[in-house]
Image (cartoon, helix red, strand yellow):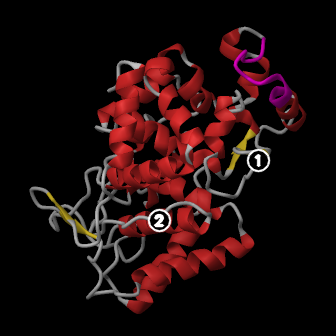
Amino acid sequence: MAASSSSSGSAATSAITAVLLVASLCVHGAAAQLCEDYYDDTCPDAYDITRQVLIDAHQSDPRIFASLIRLHFHDCFVQGCDGSLLLDSVPGMPSEKTSPPNNGSARGFPVVDAVKAALEDACPGVVSCADILALAAEISVELSGGPSWGVLLGRLDGKTSDFNGSLNLPAPTDNLTVLRSKFDDLKLNDVDLVALSGGHTFGRVQCQLVTDRLYNFSNTNMPDPTLDPAYRDFLSQRCPRNGDPTALNDLDPTTPDTFDKNYYTNIEVNRGFLNSDQELKSAPEAQGTTAPIVDQFASSQDDFFRSFAQSMINMGNLSPVTDPSLGEVRTNCKRVN
């Protein structure tokens, strides 16, 4: 982890200038082999089929792209990228869907089911639900104006759901120390933290996640002093003290449905919606760690896009299941075969 402004800047530069994985490259582990061309012979139209389902879904749900990338994130951060988030509860195994970080906020499951159904029609029993999440995340970003990258494929679906593990997902109320610790536990660094947080450049969020910052920050009965006053007034109109806690707001009020660098330019002027967003720039610890990376991405969308693509590849490689004795290709993403 970076310990000074210069070392943090060096880490960012190193990640940004790294050559992204190319189409023919595979990642090998003890029993693992993830490749961009994994389905070229067995389901060559997998990408195009997934893309068309997402385009159709977006016509009636403009939030779906942001929701799908969040599903991939929440899946990978709990026992690796294994599709465990998609499983329904069964006796003795409560679903990750029902945990507080996901219940009522994780969405897009019917679209994942629609992709799975389309792929089962085209190539039965071939494409895993875990890979569908990875493909959907990349396509969602690309269709929203963001970068594209070669998605490494070949994950199998896990057979268990980890409710307790999902309780430790990075939270919108986390301070920077906690966020860095959660990412470090998964061998993701400060550049990954700042880049992946940039997924908040599109999508919506409920009022209940900002009311403490507006009215009772750190139990002071005062607003968060890092909030820009004009933005605080705007949010107070959108989220009054006794208003609907589930009312939705744009994470990025400037370009709410476009994947761009405005997430960072907002943070630069104290207009981060979530506490976890603003912490990347305003926390005392940030000045020698994440703040220089925020500055870099705010000044260069190209740098952000390159780092985001690489960090999505890094996240997608979190403990993939590739051993057939431990995983499977589910016929239905909601349950094991």
- Using the numbered discs, state the Cα–Cα distance from disc 1 to disc 2 in whole angstroms: 22 Å
Mark on residue 148?
2
Residue drawn at (66%, 45%), measured in percent from left and top?
262
Indicate yes or no whether the magenta region holds residue 133: no
Residue 103 visible in image:
no
Does residue 226 show up magenta in the picture? Answer: yes
- Judged by its main secondary structure, the magenta piece is loop
Instruction: Please state the horizontal and vertical placement of residue 282, each as a whole percent of the image.
Output: 59, 21
Quarter of the N terminus within the rendering: top left
The spot of residue 173 in percent (x, y) is 58, 27
Q: Which residues are magenta?
A: 222-232
Marking on residue 254: 1
Q: At 72% from the left edge and 75% from the top edge, which residue is drawn?
A: 59
Q: Is residue 127 left or right of 29 when viewed as pictured?
A: right
Most extreme residue toward the right, as rendered? Answer: 237
Looking at the image, the residue that sits furthest to the left is 30
Residue 297 in view (yes/no):
yes
Q: Residue at x 62, y 64 (%)?
A: 144
The amino acid marked with disc number 1 is Thr
Q: Is residue 142 left or right of residue 210?
A: left
Residue 32 quadrant: bottom left
The disc labelled 2 sits on which kind of residue?
Ser
